[in-house]
Image: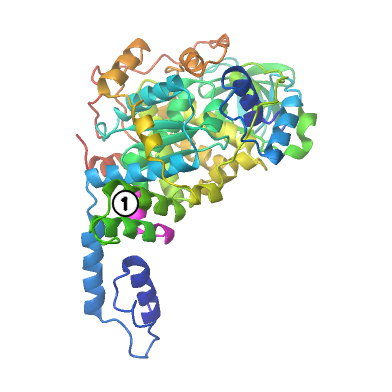
Amino acid sequence: MGCKKWFAISCEIKDSRQPSYHAGMIRPAFFLSVLLACAAPCAGAQESATTNRATELRAEPQIDAPVLAALPEGKNVKAIQRQSGWAKIEADQKTGWVRVFHLRFQATVSQTSEASGSSLLSFFKGKPRGPSTQTATIGVRGLSEEELKSATPNPEALKKLQSFMADRSVSESFAREANLAAVRVDYVDGESSSAAKGSRK
Amino acid sequence: MNPLKICIVSVALLLVGGCAGGGMPIPGAGGMPSLAQITQAAKSVQTASKDIEEPEEIEMGQGIAQSLLGAAPLVKNDRIQRYVNQVGRWLALQTERPDLPWTFGVIDNENVNAFAAPGGMIFITNGLLKGLSNEAELAGVLAHEIAHVVQKHQLNAIKSGAGADLFKQGGLALADQKLGKSAGGQIVKASGLAEAGAELIKQGLFTKPLDRGLEYEADRMGVIIAARAGYDPYGLVTVLQMLQNAKGDNPMLALLFKTHPNPADRIEQLEKLASTLDAYQGGDQGRERFAAALGLKVEKAPPVKDPAKPTPKAPAKTTPKPAAKAGG
């Protein structure tokens, strides 16, 4: 993939704010790949996608908006922006909106890497991120099956984590400040019945 | 079912079956356990593990959490940890198990993944967190994991072993410990829990897939839980599309892809809920809060309403009481 989304982001965050906690934990192979990924240009705010069915390009992100063009299945488009269930795309010099469910974002393999020059990051984050120039302190460790299976318990870490817990009132005041209002929505497909049995309060 | 199979099943499932000690019986060789033996063994295991009450579930989850934290430490950033706990607990309050000791941890690992353990222990890796761009996406991920806990998916896998042999031994280790069967009968509770948790992880709790149907269910419930909490329910869809795009040979995604259905399939399943998703789209994205909590440079939110206005925020179904949920 062009810019190795996950890696590229990790560069940015590590560099700017968490410089120390990976120190000394570098795995050469991953380290190298991160270096390469960060060095690769994250060009372009657009993402390639393909229509997964015949669909319509609409003037606005609304199901009843005027249709600008009919798009056949398999049409390659450039996705520019996302808004909930809609993606703003460009196709045949026309710009409009398509249902996100009607787009297939390509599974990319790293062999083409720089050539595509695109990153989902740019699409979903609204703008491209530049390559990082400070990669020296980055370490990347994967959480492999082996690591999981050889884990030894760390009770102190659990205690530490529990100190961060948010109780009901803390989370409710968080929501108030964020203007998050609870909405009543029922589950779909009957999960509700199985969820309801048991410890529902 | 032939006798050999029965015996294997009873050994695996029960470890107390009559065929465990005296060598494996061969069909027709006379060593076959009697129906009474099997029934007795089944009863034993029921006592041991059928009724895992909530306190035990919570302890089990904490034991598992200790071991997971042994494999991957917490991100050393109190602000991020608190933030994820606030978002997570707000989501959990919208579910049928609002009063579990919900605990959310960001683990310091570049792998892209998230985990749920019984009793309300939820983990997200730094690698996944950093790939997200707003709080609605975080909510989608956490709500998926919360749904696993609400539905006791992992707990059921552990205790029933249905379709997942590897969960069984770990579950039995815990059951044994509960019964005081472990070495000396008087084990230190905390270390026993941790050992059982470690054993469960060794047996594949986080490395063997759950049934695909359970993942789809967690997705379906996850988008609803996010909507209940006031978020744009498309957050999870966005994350899945990122994963769809990222799929390939990225080693940081290997475990996630091994343990979950293909992102494309998950998206396809969620599309069945499109009308519900649309009804609540335009909910909060929390882009600025997310960026602030992660210490990201706050990007100007893209011209979100460009050029059109979205469907107005959730219809008039709003209730002031977060805990009150219909249909549950």
Specify the quadrant of the image occupied by residue A127: top right
Q: Is residue B161 magenta?
A: yes
Of B162 and B252, which appears nearest the observer?
Answer: B252
**Residue sitting at x 37%, y 91%:** B29
**Residue sitting at x 39%, y 31%:** B104
Looking at the image, residue B194 lies above or below residue B72: below
Q: In which quadrant will I find the N terminus of chain A? A: top right
Identify residue for label 1. B192
Of B163 and B30, which appears nearest the observer?
Answer: B30
Q: How is the image coloured?
A: rainbow
Residue A167 in the image: x percent, y percent?
A: 28, 24
Q: Would residue B185 appear left or right of A88 to someone viewing this image?
A: left
Of B306 and B44, which appears nearest the observer?
Answer: B44
Residue at the far right: name it.
A115
Q: Is residue B152 magenta?
A: no
The amino acid type, in three-letter code, at marker 1 is: Gly
Looking at the image, residue B38 lies above or below residue B164: below
Residue B60 in the image: x percent, y percent?
A: 31, 47
User: Can the viewer see residue B318 in this picture?
Assistant: no
Q: Main secondary structure of the magenta part?
A: helix
Of A138 and A74, which appears nearest the observer?
Answer: A138
Q: How many marks?
A: 1
Residue B299 in the image: x percent, y percent?
A: 58, 11
Q: Would residue B279 appear left or right of A45 to someone viewing this image?
A: left
**Residue sitting at x 27%, y 54%:** B187
Q: In which quadrant will I find the C terminus of chain A? A: top left
Q: Which residues are magenta?
A: B155-167
* Chain ID at mark 1: B
